[in-house]
Amino acid sequence: MRVLLGVAVAVLALDIISKTIVVATLSDRPAVHLLGNLLMFTESRNPGAAFSIGGPSETILFTAIAVGVIIFIVRSARRIHSLAWAVALGLLLGGAMGNLTDRIFRSPGPFRGWVVDWIQVPHWPVFNLADSAIVCGGILTVLLAMLGYHLDGTHGERKAPPPEPGSDASAADADTDAPADAER
């Protein structure tokens, strides 16, 4: 739980600090080019989801989704006994909280605020550190699930627990074990 919260707080802090600097230094200025046109810093306001998906009409929907993700991760946190899962969910939580902070506190109003994006690479929408954390956490989550790592720290295929005595499943198993002639 400490790792998950530590990663989430670090992502949130870096996201807030970077957006504060971007708004203070890049607003109404041309993009700052680093490595030619390979990496640019530019201030952009995003009413949609990560990577400018959607628009102003979906802002409340994306806010509700972010709140749902945060609630799910916080409720799941006590079951996590895997360092990799703690990092993955910490990245998702910190990223969701970073963009949700913009949604709550930035103009045009509470729960409708536009997210500050500022990192631009060729052939890709402008994004921010919270978006990056969400994508990295999502990729790590998919990899962990595909490789069979579980939240509780176990690895591999899970076997179904044996049926409890007297349950319908246990009676069905007893019928299949009986000789075929027994029913005649």
Image (tube, grey):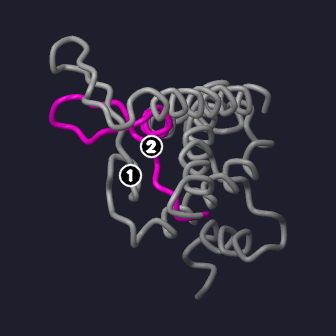
Residue 7 x, y percent position in the rendering: 66, 27
Q: List the residue tagged with mark 2.
A: 116
> Hey, what amino acid is under mark 1?
Asn
**What is the CA distance from the residue labelled 1 to the residue labelled 2?**
6 Å
Q: Is residue 4 above or below residue 169?
A: above
Residue 116 left/right relative to 6: left
Assess disc 2: are there few (<14), some (14-19) or many (≥20) residues with their C-alpha within 10 Å of its C-alpha.
many
The image quadrant that residue 151 belongs to is top right
The question of residue 134 being in magenta is answered with yes
Which residue is at 39% across, 72% downward? 57
Q: Are marks 1 and 2 in contact (CB under 8 Å)?
A: yes
Residue 148 left/right relative to 155: left
Question: Residue lying furthest right in this view?
Answer: 165
Residue 121 x, y percent position in the rendering: 23, 28
Name the secondary structure under disc 1: strand
Q: In terms of sequence position, does the residue under pointer 1 or pointer 2 come before the other? A: 1
Q: Which mark is residue 46?
A: 1
Give the magenta range: 110-135
- Quarter holding the C terminus is bottom right
Q: Is residue 15 above or below residue 57?
A: above
Residue 49 x, y percent position in the rendering: 41, 55
Viewer-closest of 29 and 110: 29
> Hey, what amino acid is under mark 2?
Val
Which residue is at 46% across, 65% downward? 59
Which residue is at 56% across, 41% downward? 92
Q: Which mark is residue 114?
A: none
Residue 21 x, y percent position in the rendering: 51, 26
Question: Residue lying furthest bottom in this view?
Answer: 184
